[in-house]
Image (tube, rainbow, N blue to C red):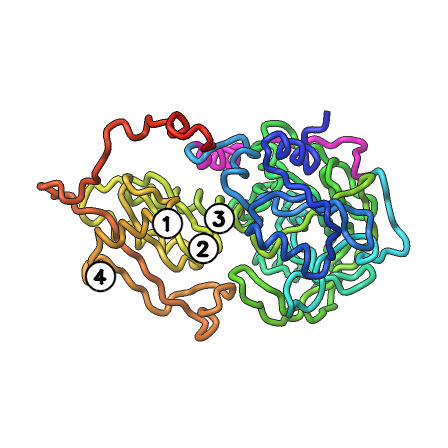
Amino acid sequence: MERQMLRYTLDKLEDMNHLMMCEKEVKTEYEIGAVLKYFRNKEPIIFNKVSNTSVKCAGGLYGDRDILYKLLDMNRENRLYKYMNAIANPQPYKLVNNGPVKENIIKRNIDLPRIIPIPKFNGRDSARFITAGVMVVKDPETNRYQTSIRRFQVNGGNNLCALIASPKLSKDFYELEKQNKPMEVAIVLGYDAYFLLASQVPSATYGVDKYEIDSALRGEPLELVKCESVDLLVPAYAEIVLEGRLIPGKRESEGPFGELMGYYGGVSHCPIIEIDTIMHRNNPIFQVAFPCREEHLANGLIREVELYNNLKNFVDVVDVNVTEGGGYRFNAFVSINKKQEGDGKSAILASLGFNRELKQVVVVDPDVNIYDVQDIEWAITTRTQAGNDLVTVEGGLGSSLEPSHGLKGKTDKIGIDATKPLNDMNGRFERAVIPGYEDIDISEYFPDIK
């Protein structure tokens, strides 16, 4: 029985009552994106009828935290341990002779827009973009597999632009380019939550094989097959795999593109990928993601692991939430067990100094729910005074994905210590509590409430 990649995930989502079916015919230009955006990319949807193609689309699959936890067989309380354990204890993958992804192999007359229903999302986007593609490469020194979500501008025919912003990936490509050698790549479409999460572990930081991280996360070996035209392995149960080469010395104008924080990114000149082979399953399902939601949730979960581990060196940290509103990278809420009065400030400094992209952090006590923005707002309102509890850092390093950073190429950062004082002798900061409130089953009072 199939247990890996997209189709198993769709069955699981349907069993969980978390899969919506769209039977209305939709256009790839703007309409698919509009529907996904309406649901904030948090509702898994199958588009069964897409104009001018027989290929179905699946989107919004991994944009909701709670759904993602269920798909990963974990929960909020144990997620950090499971992530850390997989990074620390990678497990072997499994090479198999054949798999469903090889049911159809195309090597001639490759015209990507004709074969795949690739959406155009926003009005000023320069072209159609593949937004859910996982790029697979091999480390040229170690032969370890590296995977990462990239956006791919579709230039027509078999030609793509690849935005390879990762320092590690860029370095490896530029080294090959100096030797006038192409970099072999595969682009995987139609994968599961384990494959997505493994792709977000930083290669430069940990130097791990992403396929081995995947195997550790899923608790069984990831099954892989050999590509047809490049020396790479890809998931046997993927829906679609594009095989090709990053071409040395060739660039194409890429962008603008509706980016992470809802603004248009600029125009740059990016390397070209020429696709030599397409492998796909019978009746393939094309995976899409409204930019740039799904991979950034998974990326935020990995950032939480790293932030949590760093904070452990300074304070008694309870939990961290790298927030949706901050693009899962710019803002964080941190819960600590405060032991001395300087702990809140220490947590702020340790957070802002750890990751250049983190711009704002709020530190609270364990009685504040860091996944409830209203609770955070309450803590800031009732437990802080600006003159004492705000920490500002001017002119720090930031991220080009955050538009205000682009004004001067640097970023001001802020931390808010919203912890209560330790010497609260009169209990002024003790929250009012109704005894037995947590045990109330409201459906006993109102049976129609689910």
* Number of residues whose C-alpha sits closer than 10 Å to that of mark 2, classed few (under 14), some (14–19) or many (20 or more): few
* C-alpha distance separating marks 4 and 2: 23 Å
Magenta residues span 78-101
Which residue occupies 17% across, 47% down?
Answer: 421
Q: Amino acid at mark 1?
A: Val
Q: Name the outermost residue toward the left.
A: 426
Q: Amino acid at mark 3?
A: Gly
* Number of residues whose C-alpha sits closer than 10 Å to that of mark 3, classed few (under 14), some (14–19) or many (20 or more): many
- Residue for badge 1: 373
* C-alpha distance separating marks 1 and 3: 17 Å
Quarter occupied by the N terminus: top right
Q: Do tag 1 and tag 2 residues touch (Cβ < 8 Å)?
A: yes
Q: Earlier in the sequence, mark 4 or mark 2?
A: 2
- Residue for badge 2: 325
- Residue for badge 3: 300
Quadrant assignment, res 4: top right
Label 4 secondary element: helix
